[in-house]
């Protein structure tokens, strides 16, 4: 990063006409230069390790790096009137190439140049204790949550981050005796599923992804009853009990062997993670004294628990869902929905992806949620998300045959798997 950018960005922390602070600034700039060298070295190591067939090969790159001694000064979101752009904005950690696929139908075989140019098949999906260190902390501290650690203090986050276990295996594998493909359904909560009668079709997939208030009991005919992967935040676990109780919500999905994927949205999610991983109550924050493991109905197991990496989340925003709202004063609150993150998680771990319960062109015909059977409740556009941008992307990916988007006016049927 050039010294000009540094002066503009951190000038409000250090008064340059003060001799003592000038010394501090010089020391800070020297440390930033060292961190840049370390990151460049890490990129070289990652490229070398990507040639290794080991699934964990390049994920060890962060472990081999010398770490910076201290965290950089906390950057404030309030100092920026729109999404800041850094010269390393498009630098992402990448793991070893994904498993080779023999699936002829795999989305990775697409000839769509626009998609393949943007798509990173080996983007780092998961954060864990072995791929986060001081240099990584300082890099990610330039990005607002959930895409990084801007506004957060090192000890507040790293206490939990250093507890996250390294995943022992890829999220999904081809089913034994199958066709070599990984066929996935991603099920959202939109009202288009009310009366759809596609439950059996959804359950016929190898794996079923769900997110947020994923109620299935009593709605099986329309949404199915299987859940293989559940994507959530601490907020979605806690609030669903209150907001959806009247529709029959009792708990998060807890199928035998289910895999849980957490999206760390804010500081409260790391506070939740610390309690979860230690098997204790949450020590601070809005979920103080709650016991996270109770929310997983006995199915929490660290070998089946994953935490999405900030680079993965930022890559989705930057390359696929860059909303015009990011250029406004509300930029720091704008992010893709949990449903969008889930679709992209499926795109990076499955060969075929069928999406159900997401916004389509005729969304105004349906209630907000599929559980709202008796009364037509119009769709609510939460200000933190750009729903129409997401709708347009799903339709575009459907038309380009990257995914299949369930639409009521779509007569296309899922091919026999």
Image (tube, helix red, strand yellow):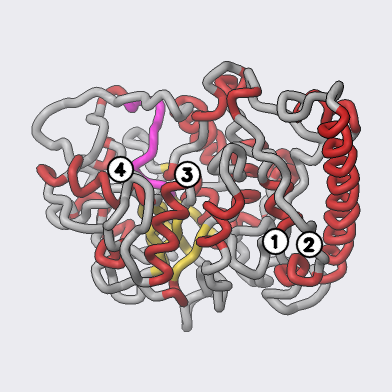
353 up-or-down from 27: above or below = below
**Residue 67 got which mark?**
2
Res. 329 in view: yes
Task: State how far apart marks 3 and 2 are (Cα).
Answer: 25 Å
Task: State how far apart marks 4 and 2 are (Cα).
Answer: 43 Å
Q: Secondary structure at mark 3?
A: loop
Residue 176 horizontal side relative to residue 295, left or right: right
Mark found first going from the N terminus, 4 or 3: 4
Please tell me in which quadrant of the rendered image residue 133 appears.
Answer: bottom right
Res. 111 in view: no
Q: State which quarter of the image contains the C terminus.
A: bottom left
Q: Nearer the viewer, residue 76 or 397?
A: 76
Task: Report crowding for label 2: few under 14, some 14 to 19, many 20 or more residues within 10 A (C-alpha).
Answer: some
Q: Which residue is painted at 30% across and 67% down in the image?
A: 293
Select label 3 or label 2 by which is in front: 2
Mark found first going from the N terminus, 4 or 2: 2
Q: Nearer the viewer, residue 279 or 192?
A: 279
Q: Main SS of the magenta segment? A: loop
Task: State how far apart marks 4 and 1 are (Cα).
Answer: 37 Å
Residue 291 horizontal side relative to residue 159, left or right: left
Select label 4 or label 1 by which is in front: 1
Which residue was labeled with disc 4? 189
Which residue was labeled with disc 1? 133
Task: State how far apart marks 4 and 3 are (Cα).
Answer: 23 Å
Q: Secondary structure at mark 4?
A: loop
Q: Which residues are magenta?
A: 355-363
Q: Secondary structure at mark 2?
A: loop
Select label 4 or label 2 by which is in front: 2
* Residue 342 percent across, percent down from the top left: 47, 50
Residues at discs 2 and 1 in contact (Cβ within 8 Å): yes
């Amino acid at each position: 990063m050039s010294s000009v950018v540094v002066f503009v960005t951190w000038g409000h922390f250090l008064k340059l006409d003060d001799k003592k602070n000038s010394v501090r600034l010089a020391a800070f700039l020297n440390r930033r230069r060292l961190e840049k060298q370390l990151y460049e070295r890490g990129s070289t190591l990652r490229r070398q390790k990507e040639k290794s067939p080991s699934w964990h090969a390049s994920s060890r790159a962060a472990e081999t790096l010398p770490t910076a001694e201290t965290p950089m000064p906390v950057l404030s979101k309030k100092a920026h009137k729109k999404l800041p752009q850094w010269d390393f904005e498009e630098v992402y950690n990448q793991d070893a190439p994904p498993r080779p696929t023999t699936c002829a139908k795999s989305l990775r075989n697409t000839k769509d140049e626009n998609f393949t140019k943007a798509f990173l098949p080996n983007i780092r999906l998961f954060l864990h204790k072995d791929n986060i260190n001081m240099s990584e902390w300082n890099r990610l501290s330039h990005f607002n949550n959930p895409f990084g650690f801007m506004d957060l203090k090192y000890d507040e986050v790293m206490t939990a981050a250093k507890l996250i276990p390294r995943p022992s295996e890829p999220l999904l594998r081809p089913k034994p005796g199958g066709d070599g493909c990984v066929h996935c359904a991603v099920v959202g909560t939109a009202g288009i599923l009310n009366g759809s009668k596609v439950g059996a079709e959804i359950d016929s997939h190898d794996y079923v992804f769900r997110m947020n208030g994923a109620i299935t009991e009593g709605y099986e005919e329309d949404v199915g009853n299987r859940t293989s992967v559940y994507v959530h935040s601490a907020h979605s676990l806690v609030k669903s009990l209150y907001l959806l109780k009247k529709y029959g919500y009792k708990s998060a999905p807890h199928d035998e062997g289910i895999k849980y994927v957490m999206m760390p949205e804010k500081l409260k999610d790391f506070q939740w993670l610390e309690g979860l991983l230690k098997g204790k109550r949450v020590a601070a924050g809005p979920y103080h004294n709650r016991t996270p493991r109770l929310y997983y109905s006995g199915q929490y197991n660290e070998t089946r628990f994953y935490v999405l990496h900030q680079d993965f989340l930022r890559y989705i925003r930057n390359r696929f869902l860059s909303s015009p709202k990011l250029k406004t004063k509300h930029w720091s609150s704008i992010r893709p929905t949990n449903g969008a993150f889930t679709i992209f998680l499926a795109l990076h771990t499955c060969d075929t992806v069928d999406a159900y319960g997401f916004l389509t062109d005729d969304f105004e015909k349906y209630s907000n949620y599929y559980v709202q059977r008796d009364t037509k409740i119009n769709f609510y556009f939460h200000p933190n998300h750009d729903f129409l941008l997401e709708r347009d992307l799903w339709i575009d990916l459907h038309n380009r045959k990257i995914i299949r988007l369930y639409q009521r006016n779509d007569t296309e049927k899922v091919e026999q798997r």
